[in-house]
Image: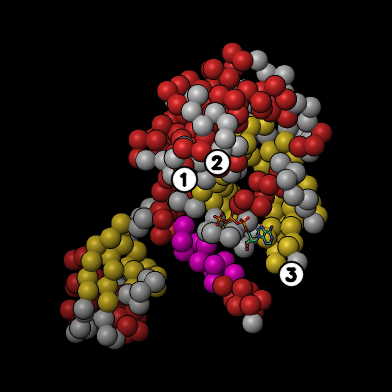
Amino acid sequence: MIEVAQLTKHYGRRVAVDGLSFTVHPGRVTGFLGPNGAGKSTTMRLLLELDRPTSGSALIDGRPYGRLVEPLRHVGALLDAKSAHPGRSAYDHLLGLAASNRIGRRRVQEVIGLVGLESVARKRVRGFSLGMSQRLGLAAALLGDPPVLILDEPVNGLDPEGVKWMRDLLIRLAREGRTVFLSSHLMNEMAVTAEHLIIIGQGRLLADLSTADFVARHAGSYVRVRSPERERLRHALVAGGVSVEDGADGALHAIDARMEEIGAIVHAENLAVTELTPCSASLEEAFMQLTASAVEYRGQQEAEVNR
Ligand SMILES: Nc1ncnc2c1ncn2[C@@H]1O[C@H](COP(=O)(O)OP(=O)(O)OP(=O)(O)O)[C@@H](O)[C@H]1O
C-alpha cells in the first residue's frame, strides 16, 4: 500500500506538489494521470526519497522509503529507463543491483526471462533502444519480487506489441496481490490498463475514482452542432430540452442527443447550421477537459515567473 498525506513540494516559487493526499491499494493497477508538469514524477521521487518534501508524508507499506531494509524487496521502481550504466551489460547491471540487496543470480536470470531480454542480456546497455531500456528498468524493479511497484511512464518508447505486453504483465502482477502504481499522461492507455485512477493537475488532486466510474461518467455520445448564431442556437436547444455543453472549438455539444432531434429543432427555429456531426465522447477528451483549467493556470503562473 502507498499512502500520501498532505504532500507538498516547492522548488523556489514553483509549487510542484500541493497538499496531495491519496492511497494506492494492493491487488489492482492504479493509474496516476496528469498533463505534463502536473507533478507526477515529483510525487514518485518523493515516495522514493530521491527528493525531500516541503511538508507532508509519503509512505510505502506504512514506512518512509528510507526506513525499508533491503528496499528492493519492498518496492520496485522504474523512474528513468536510461539510468543504467551504458558501458555495462544488462546482466551485469542487474547483478550489481541484486548483490546490494542480497538477491541471488537465479533471480537475475528469472527477471531477464520475464521481461524478454534473454537474447541481449550480455550486450552493453549503450546500444539499447528506449523500449529495451524500459524492459531492463522493469526487470530491475522486479528483482526483489516486491509487493509494491512504482513506474513512471513505463510504456514510453514501446511499440504497440510492447505496450500490450507491458499492460498484460502489470495486470498480472496486480492480480498476484501487488500494489501497482504507474504514471501516464495518456488517458486511453490508462483506461485499458488501470482499474483505478488518481488524476492530478498543478500538483493537486482532481479525481480519485475507479476507471469504470470515469468511463460511465464521460464516455457518452453527443452531437456537435455549429451555427453563426451560436447563442440563439444554444437557447433553442435548451428550450427543446437538450443538455448543452461548450465544445473547445466554438461548437456546441448536444449531450446524448440524436441528429434527427437537433435537425428538427434548428429547422423549427429557422437557424442556419454549418455543422451537425454525431460524436462519441472520447476518454482522452474528458481527461483534457478535467485537467484544462489546471493547464491554463499553470500557463499563467509560468508566464508570471518568466516575466
Ligand atoms: N528539480 C526541479 N527544480 C525545479 N522545478 C522542478 C524540478 N522538478 C520538477 N520541477 C517542476 O515541478 C513541476 C512538476 O514537474 P513533474 O516533472 O513532477 O511533472 P510531471 O507530471 O511528471 O510531468 P511530465 O508528464 O512532463 O513528466 C513542473 O512545473 C516542473 O517544471
Q: Which mark is residue 81?
A: 2
Which residue is found at the position 46% from the left and 37% from the top? 128
- Which label's residue is closer to the chain start, 1 or 3? 3
Which residue is found at the position 74% from the left and 69% from the top? 13
> What quarter of the picture does the N terminus occupy?
top right
Q: Amino acid at mark 1?
A: Asn
Q: Nearer the viewer, mark 1 or mark 2?
A: 2
Q: Amino acid at mark 3?
A: Arg
Classify 82 as above or below 35: above
User: Which picture quadrant has residue 80?
Assistant: top right
Q: Position of residue 301 (x, y in %)?
A: 63, 74
Q: Nearer the viewer, mark 3 or mark 2?
A: 2
Magenta residue check for 296: yes
Residue hosting label 1: 156
- Which label's residue is closer to the chain start, 3 or 2? 3
Badge 2 marks a residue whose secondary structure is: helix
The reply to whether discs 1 and 2 touch (Cβ–Cβ < 8 Å) is yes
